[in-house]
Amino acid sequence: MPRTRQKDDVETIVAKAFAHPLRVQILIILNERVASPNLLAQELDQSLNLVAYHVRVLEKYECIELVDTKQRRGATEHFYRATRRPFLSDAEWSRLPDVLRPALSGAVLQSIFGDVEEAVKSGTMDERNDFHVSRTPMIIDRTGWEETSALLGETLERLLQIQTRSSQRLADNDEKGMLAKVELLHFKSPESDEGEAEAKKAAAEAAKAD
């Protein structure tokens, strides 16, 4: 019988798969739509050989899967989709070397900035009355940090459940779905007198509201 991968093995493999920012960018795109290395290379403005290599790595680590092939100019073009989300769990992130973390975060942030810029330019950012934009500086202790991280993890799980239920409803009716994007950020900010004053002011206002 084939050996079942242990949890530690899976976390190590996923960390390796995410160990290059271009692979993260590829995975982000393949989470949104099916694409071939050729189409990915054009969108990312990278050489086909380089993109094809990273696609093979993602396929090797079971982050993407082949879903279709088409004949184009005498060659076979392979189309892939993502099989996992373009983010890491805390355990997976802990296995990623510190030197690789800025590039990975940068790749995700680049996509987030692109999403926001596109929505602002197109006018869809504030089109709906129930859209949400907020910024919340806080001063918290270690427990507060852990509670915030856990809350965002739970929120992400609920968002994925909402997406699944929406997909099921859309499949059963003629409603046209809308493309919505939720960008979650939670990070440690550099210490500064100005930042601390801002956070204390926000905390005081929150206390008054309660």
Image: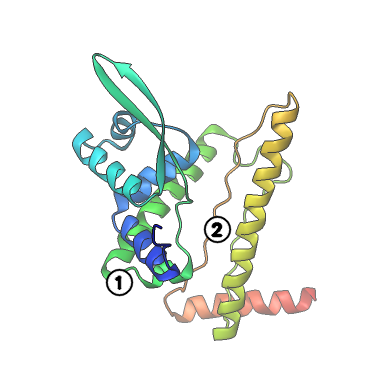
Which residue is at 29% across, 16% downward? Answer: 72
Residue 86 is left or right of residue 78, and the answer is right
**Residue with the mark numbered 1:** 98
Depicted 148 relative to depicted 13: above or below: below
Residue 60 is left or right of residue 92, and the answer is left
**Residue with the mark numbered 2:** 184
- The residue under label 1 is which amino acid type? Asp
Q: Earlier in the sequence, mark 2 or mark 1?
A: 1
Q: Which residue ends up furthest to the right in the rendered image?
A: 210
Query: In the image, residue 105 lies at what x, y percent?
Result: 38, 60
Query: In the image, residue 50 lies at what x, y percent?
Result: 21, 41
Q: Which residue ends up furthest to the front in the rendered image?
A: 1
For the residue labelled by badge 2, is the local secondary structure a helix, a strand or a loop? Answer: loop
- The residue under label 2 is which amino acid type? Leu
Residue 117 is left or right of residue 94, and the answer is right
Q: Out of 119 and 193, give the one closest to the viewer.
A: 119
Mark 2 and mark 1 residues within 8 Å of each other at the beta carbon: no
Distance Cα–Cα, label 2 vs label 1: 21 Å
